Image: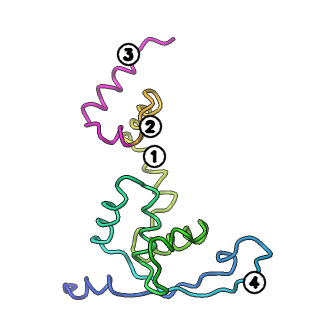
Amino acid sequence: MLSADELLAGGTITYEVDVPPEILSPAEGASPPLKSGAVRLRPLTVGDMQLIQRAARERDALVGPLMVHKALVEPPLSVQQVGMLHVGLVQFLLREVNRISGIDAGLDHFKASASEPIARAAHILAREFGWTPQEVNELTLGQILLHLQMLSEKPAT
């Protein structure tokens, strides 16, 4: 059996991740030309994710940059500096943060989630009633079923 110390040790390990030059400078002709380099990342903890979710409650777009900010050990960057990185670099770093944190949700995961009945129901309700994902998320299961029943009984126009 693993000890508590062994389980907790995984959250303190750091990883050196090479950033290829095509990620640093995706368009040709950068002046001066950028070469590859490395950054040091650490896995995100449950506490990190709770803090990130609270901080990004109003703006989902902040989740990725906040995850990169919390995981980036070297060089340390402020949240504002992470926000100044180009999108391709942030996406690359976020994929690496997800990988080392064990949050490897690939395309198959999203396809499977999208086929779940509750996800399909949420999509139908959002489309039919013009609701935002936030509004659909606030519905109880009973409310979702009631609205779906009402839609199924709606006469065709």
The Cα atoms of the two marked residues, 1 and 4, are separated by 44 Å
Coordinates of residue 1 in the picture (x, y in percent): 20, 84
Residue pointed to by mark 2:
123
125 lies above or below 103 = above
Task: Tell which circle, 1 or 2, labels the residue nearer the N-terminal end.
Answer: 1
Q: Could you give the CA–CA distance between mark 3 and mark 1, rounded to whole angstroms?
A: 24 Å
| Disc 3: which residue | 153
Which residue is found at the position 49% from the left and 86% from the top? 75
The label shown at residue 114 is 1
Query: Is 31 in the magenta?
Result: no
Q: Which colour scheme is used?
A: rainbow
Label 4 Cα crowd, 10 Å radius (few <14 / some 14-19 / many 20+): few
Q: Are marks 2 and 3 in contact (CB under 8 Å)?
A: no
Q: What element carries label 2?
A: helix
Q: Determine whether, in the image, residue 9 is placed left or right of residue 154.
A: left
x 33%, y 22%: residue: 149
